Image (spheres, rainbow, N blue to C red):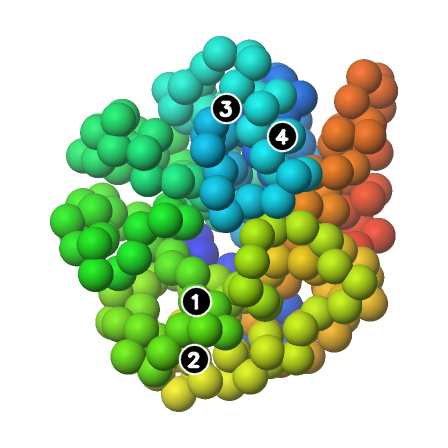
Amino acid sequence: MSRIPQVFSQLKQQGRKAFVPFITAGDPDLATTGKLLVELARAGAGVIELGVPFSDPMADGPVIQRASERALENEFGLDEIFQVVEQSRREIETPIILFSYFNPLLQYGCKRLCQEAKRVGVDGVLVTDLTPEEATDFSAELRAHDLNMIFLIAPTSTDVRLRLVAKHASGFIYAVSRAGVTGTRESVSSEAEKLVKRMRAFSDLPIVVGFGISSPSQVAEVEKYADGVVVGSAIVAEIERAKGREDIVAHLGEFARSLMPVLNTK
C-alpha cells in the first residue's frame, strides 16, 4: 500500500482525520521550504500539499498569488523542488503531493516528471486546471509510476462529473468548499457537506475539504463529515507575516498545531 492510502487507513482506524497543510515551494526560499516540510510532518500533518509556483495562478486568491510571486523571484524550477522533497525524505515519511497548474508540468515533460517524482518520494499530483476528460494520458503515466492522481470537485460539479472523477481519481478526492478562488473565509459554506455526501455515493476514496478554512473551529466543523481538512491561505499568509524571522520554521509549526482539532492531537 502506498503512503497516501496507508495514512488515511491508519487515521480511520484511530478515529482521526487528516490535517492537510499547503505551502508554496520556494516561499520564502527553498531552504525554508525543506525545513517546513519536516516541521509540518512532525506537527502532525497527514498529507502535505506542495504548491508549484506559477505566473498565472487563476484559481488562487491574492495570498497564494503573492506567494507564487515571491517564490518565482528565486528563479528555480521543478528540478530544485524535487531536490527539496528528496532531502526531506531523509527525515519524514508523510505523503507529499505536488499541487500545480498543468503548464509547468507539461513544459517539464510528463514522463520525466513522473520518473523524478517517484524517485524523490512524491506521492501524487493534483493539477488544478486539468479536468478528468483531458487527463487520460497524464493519469496513465502517473499510474504507471505508482503515483496518485488527485482531482478537484466543486459544489457546481454535476453527477456526471463526480462519476468521472470517481473513475479516474486515486489517493483521495479534494472537495472545494465553495465556488471561487482560494482564500480565508469567516465561515465554511454549507455546500461543502452536501458535496461530500454526493461524492460518497460514487467513490470510497477519502474526501478532503479545502478552500476558505482558516481557524480551529472551521477545521473541527469540517472534520465532522470529511476525511481530511486542507488549510492553505491561512498558513501561506502566516509565512508572509513571518518572513525574515529567525524562528519562522518553529513558528509555522506552532501555527499549524494551533489549527488542528483536539481529535488530531491525541
Disc with the residue nearer the chain's start (3 vs 4): 4
Q: Amino acid at mark 1?
A: Ile
Disc with the residue nearer the chain's start (2 vs 4): 4
Give the SS element for disc 4: helix
Disc with the residue nearer the chain's start (2 vs 3): 3
Q: Amino acid at mark 2?
A: Met
Residue 77, given in percent of the width and then of the height, sits at 41, 19
Q: Where is mark 2, residue-wise?
A: 199
Q: Are marks 1 and 2 in contact (CB under 8 Å)?
A: yes
> CA gap, disc 3 to disc 4?
17 Å
The answer, for residue 144, to whether it is visible in the render is no
Of the numbered discs in the image, which one, if any, rests on residue 67?
4
* Residue 186 vertical placement versus 59 (above, below): below
Give the SS element for disc 2: helix
> CA gap, disc 4 to disc 1?
24 Å
Residue shown at the point (50%, 24%) measured from the top left: 84
Disc with the residue nearer the chain's start (1 vs 2): 1
Disc with the residue nearer the chain's start (4 vs 1): 4
* Residue 16 vertical placement versus 78 (above, below): below
Q: Are marks 3 and 4 in contact (CB under 8 Å)?
A: no
Tell me if 174 is positioned left or right of 124 in this view: right
Q: Where is mark 3, residue-wise?
A: 84
Dot 4 crowding, Cα within 10 Å, few <14, some 14–19, many 20+:
many
Of the numbered discs in the image, which one, if any, rests on residue 153?
1
Tell me if 208 is positioned left or right of 259 in this view: left
Q: Amino acid at mark 3?
A: Val
Dot 1 crowding, Cα within 10 Å, few <14, some 14–19, many 20+:
many
Residue shown at the point (44%, 56%) measured from the top left: 4
Residue 220, given in percent of the width and then of the height, sits at 76, 70
Q: Are marks 2 and 3 in contact (CB under 8 Å)?
A: no
1 or 3: mark nearer the eye: 1
Disc with the residue nearer the chain's start (1 vs 3): 3
